[in-house]
Amino acid sequence: MAAGMCLLLLLALCFGEMGLPRYFAMRDHARQLEQDIRELQRTATGLRGDIDRLEHDPGRIEQLARERLGYVRKGETVYHVVPEGPEQRARP
């Protein structure tokens, strides 16, 4: 009788709903989540640095305004280079 109970408990441990396969799957999932958390923490640190530079570095603000908004300083000359398209090459 005791041997049967031990066998039943062993089978439940190995193949039951909350058995070893489920344990290993959950352990792997937890490791993946920990890795995701570390990656998100690195991203958050980088973004905090960007925020700090935007709040305190006028040069960075100017750089972004020039790149993204096309701003120029007073007195600067802007040259817009347009590559030749196929229709312009055909003209004599």
Image (tube, helix red, strand yellow):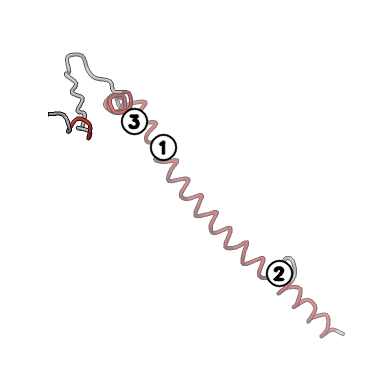
Q: Which residue is mark 2?
A: 19
Mark number for residue 47? 1
Which one is in front, 69 or 53?
69
Mark number for residue 22? none
- Residue at x 19% of width, y 21% of height: 78
Against 46, residue 18 (above or below) is: below
* Mark 2–mark 3 CB contact (< 8 Å): no
Left or right of 28 on screen, residue 42 = left
- Residue at x 50% of width, y 51% of height: 36
Mark number for residue 53? 3
Left or right of 12 on screen, residue 22 = left
Which one is in front, 3 or 77?
77
What quarter of the picture does the N terminus occupy?
A: bottom right
Against 20, residue 26 (above or below) is: above
Q: Residue furthest top?
A: 74
Spatial separation of the CA atoms under disc 2 and disc 3: 51 Å
- Looking at the rendered structure, the kind of residue marked 1 is Leu
Q: In the rendered structure, which disc, 2 or 1, sits on the residue that comes first in sequence? A: 2
- Residue 71, quarter of the rendered image: top left
- Looking at the rendered structure, the kind of residue marked 3 is Arg
